[in-house]
Image (cartoon, grey):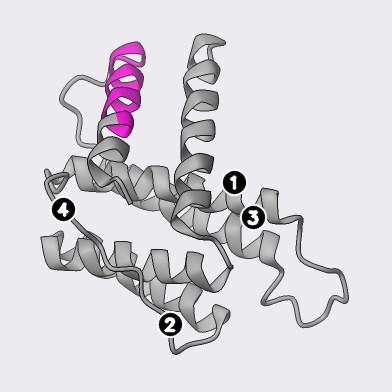
Amino acid sequence: MNLEKLFHLQQNLNERIEKEHELGQTSLLSKKVLALQVELAELANETKCFKYWSSKSASDRSIILEEFVDCLHFILSLGLEKNFENINKVNVKDSQYDIIAQFLNLYVDINDFFICSSKDNYITLFEDFLALGKSLDFNIEDIENAYLIKNSINHKRQDEGY
């Protein structure tokens, strides 16, 4: 995964949003953490992994991937907020847990990062998130390409006064 490129693209989007919305030097950490939690819930909702009461299938793969990269935008943004954009590598590992446990674990990771915004907690969050992506059958190329598309959409939304 080309982290340098992704952090750079996210930084450009963040700077644009902060300038256009006149956010100046305002700390957005708590808002970004909540945004990530909400986006993670939207991702879970599209997988329908927890909906034991429903026989409906998961959403199309493309919709799930789009929700996944929405989360990635906020993970990158959190790293930028804490100046962790210099990480060279995050490991993409297999998870030993089912998808539901992975979602729940990510909420713990987000909370841990919010309480103690250390680089180690950030890398754990990032790696566990990529493990979820692997469990959802997304490879690095899928994720990067979808991120590029969604980043472009997010810039267009800013053009349109989103």
Q: Earlier in the sequence, mark 1 or mark 2?
A: 1
Q: Residue at x 35, y 12 (%)?
A: 20
Hey, which quadrant is residue 29 in on the image?
top left
Disc number for residue 95: 2
Q: CA distance from mark 3 to mark 2?
A: 19 Å
Q: CA distance from mark 1 to mark 2?
A: 21 Å
Instruction: Write down the residue under mark 4.
Output: 88
Disc number for residue 66: 1
Q: CA distance from mark 4 to mark 2?
A: 21 Å
Q: Which one is in front, 69 or 111?
A: 69
Q: Earlier in the sequence, mark 3 or mark 4?
A: 3
Instruction: Write down the residue under mark 3.
Output: 64
User: Which secondary structure lies at badge 2?
Assistant: loop
Label 4 or label 2, whichever lies nearer to me, is 4
Q: Earlier in the sequence, mark 4 or mark 1?
A: 1
Q: Residue at x 47, y 34 (%)?
A: 148
Task: Look at the image and say whether residue 100 sits in the magenta stretch.
Answer: no
Span of residues in magenta: 9-22
